[in-house]
Amino acid sequence: MNTSNHQNPFQTSGGVGQAPSSRQWDYRDINAPALAPGKAANAFMTRIFTVMSLGLAITGLMAWLFATKYLGNYEQAAAFYTSPMKWVVMLAPFAFVLVLTFGIQRLSYPVATGIFIAFASVMGISLSSIFFVYEMSTIFQVFLMTSGTFAAMALIGATTNIDLTKMGSILMFALIGLIITSVVNYFFHSPFLHYLIGGAGVVIFAGLTAYDTQRFLRMGYQVEAGSDGANKLALMGALSLYLDFINLFLFLLRLFGGGNRN
């Protein structure tokens, strides 16, 4: 998740519910999105977007506080992001994601929620470098652009009658290719690949936003509202959409970060 070219020292590379018709929906059922979601599904998706929004707010606040209160100026930030601490800050969020992804069934919901909040906080610290790379006006404009794109793609995912399962599989393979290309460009510093990666990243994560929204909406027909399983699944949905938003923001910043201070 890189925000600028690689020469910049601040680069940051139980129960099963029922649908209104009393039929138990398989979340892969292509016809499921065509039906008006029941109250349980609506509550499930509301929880997902609420937790996701809370995570984004924590990330934004932590990024700003760390940049302005802890680092303070460009020289201190340069020293921090060229020290070994750079790798701790960059890799720590992945550790939290792995714990949540592979340990969610063994964790209680309050503990899992605490880990998500800690993850969002550490992610904010890892993204604090953007305040030294881009102008504040650029960050704000790209955030608005990201919010609009994310909302539009989430709406498409929630309302379309087209099954996006196959598209999701294709996008995941494309994401693997994008990661490989990013690693290659880390050594070659190609401006063409830099912008190609940015454009591809926007397309991939915009598509994943629609796919993840549809995927969790369909799951919402199956969960028992208020159950521990439903709460944990909503937390994982929030995590997925949070990552879609963050990555969409970073790739748009790569493309439209015309306010780069350096």
Image (tube, rainbow, N blue to C red):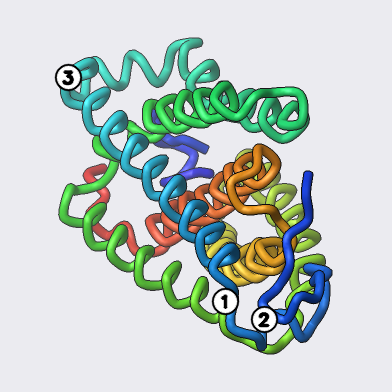
Residue under numbered circle 3: 69
**Pointer 3 and pointer 1: residues touching (CB < 8 Å)?**
no
Residue 196 visible in this rendered orientation of the protein: no
* Circle number at residue 124: none
Above or below residue 77? Residue 5 is below
**Pointer 1 and pointer 2: residues touching (CB < 8 Å)?**
yes
Residue under numbered circle 1: 158
Amino acid bearing label 1: Ala
- Residue 231 location (% of width, % of height): 60, 42
- Residue 189 location (% of width, % of height): 56, 46
Amino acid bearing label 3: Lys
**Looking at this view, is 43 or 130 the one in front?**
43
Q: Residue at x 72, y 81 (%)?
A: 21
- Residue 19 location (% of width, % of height): 70, 73
Other residues around mark 2 within 10 Å, as few (<14) / some (14–19) / many (≥20): many
Disc 3 versus disc 1: nearer the observer: 1
- Residue 187 location (% of width, % of height): 64, 39
Above or below residue 44? Residue 122 is above
Earlier in the chain: of badge 3 and badge 1, it is 3
